[in-house]
Image (tube, rainbow, N blue to C red):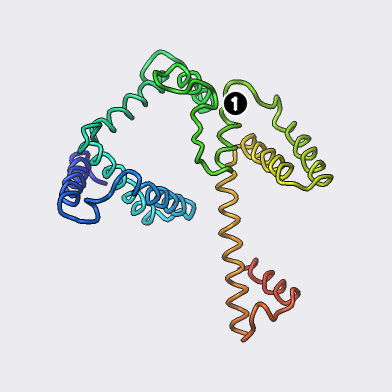
Amino acid sequence: MSSREEQLAAFGRLLDIMDTLREKCPWDKKQTFDSLRQNTIEETYELATAISRHDMNEISKELGDVLLHVVFYAKMGSETGDFDIADVCNKISDKLIFRHPHVYGEAAAQNAEDVSHLWEQVKLKEKGGNKTVLGGIPDSLPSLVKAYRIQDKVANVGFDWKQKEDVWDKVKEEIGEFEENPSEEELGDILFSLINVARLYKLKPDNALEQTNLKFIKRFNYVEAKAKEQNKNLQDMSLEEMEELWQEAKQV
């Protein structure tokens, strides 16, 4: 692994390259905060995909793409005199120190759960921080992640089930209401309650769903490939024929 000196040199090299590109490349020169926003979102999702696949080489590559965007925004901020990369680093460093009084101060935390409870208290005291418990949740978060964060935050201030097993009655209740009245609202209630189950059992619902997505894609690709080997189109196959190939795919 690289030494700290090598790491700092590599970061300095990236900053120098960004300076050059901003000066000499027509595309980089014309970019703004607004024009880069969608690219940043896409790069973040590409990183998330690499993480879900546990592809370390790809994770390293995608982290570089995300880091480029951080450096790019900081460069544009320095051009307007609003902030630069030092401000970015110092602000996150100050925040980390402030939010870890159990490491840098006198507070006590014995485990990760204690830390989570402590964070919610600290965030409400933080200058310029959250004014309400749910105030720090971004509006643009994907719904699945947002639901988990909502439940996690309110749990950290004591609004939670006494026993995790109690949540199953709520799930059954929501399913019953959906059966009586199939609607988006009732479906949303089921999903929200299932996300609560995931949180209580210390599972990440977005990770779980993505793993199922990838598993389904792999199996369906197998079915499609086998159909082509048999010179058949999926549209012309019976459900029974496809189900037979699907069962084969589950054994691969």
Q: Residue at x 25, y 37 (%)?
A: 77
Q: Nearer the viewer, residue 28 or 170?
A: 28
Horizontal and vertical percent position of residue 194: 68, 41
User: Residue 113's image quarter?
Assistant: top right
User: Residue 246 location in percent, x, y?
Assistant: 67, 70
* Coordinates of residue 132 in the picture (x, y in percent): 53, 21
Mark 1: secondary structure: helix
Q: Report which residue position mark 1 lands on.
A: 154
Would you call the spot at circle 1 few (<14 residues within 10 Å), some (14-19), or many (20 or more)? some
Comparing 153 with 111, the one in front is 153
In the rendered view, tell whether residue 73 sits above or below residue 65: above
Q: Residue at x 38, y 46 (%)?
A: 37
Report the front residue among 143 and 225: 143
The amino acid marked with disc number 1 is Val
Q: Residue at x 58, y 21 (%)?
A: 157
Q: Residue at x 56, y 28 (%)?
A: 153
Task: Indicate left or right for 15 with 247 as reference.
Answer: left
Measuring from the top left, give residue 137's x and y in whole percent.
51, 32
**Quarter of the rendering containing residue 76:** top left
Q: Is residue 114 above or below residue 144?
A: above
**Closer to the camera in the image, 137 or 200:** 137
Q: Quadrant of the C terminus?
A: bottom right
Q: Quadrant of residue 188?
A: top right
Position of residue 47 relative to residue 176, above or below, is: below
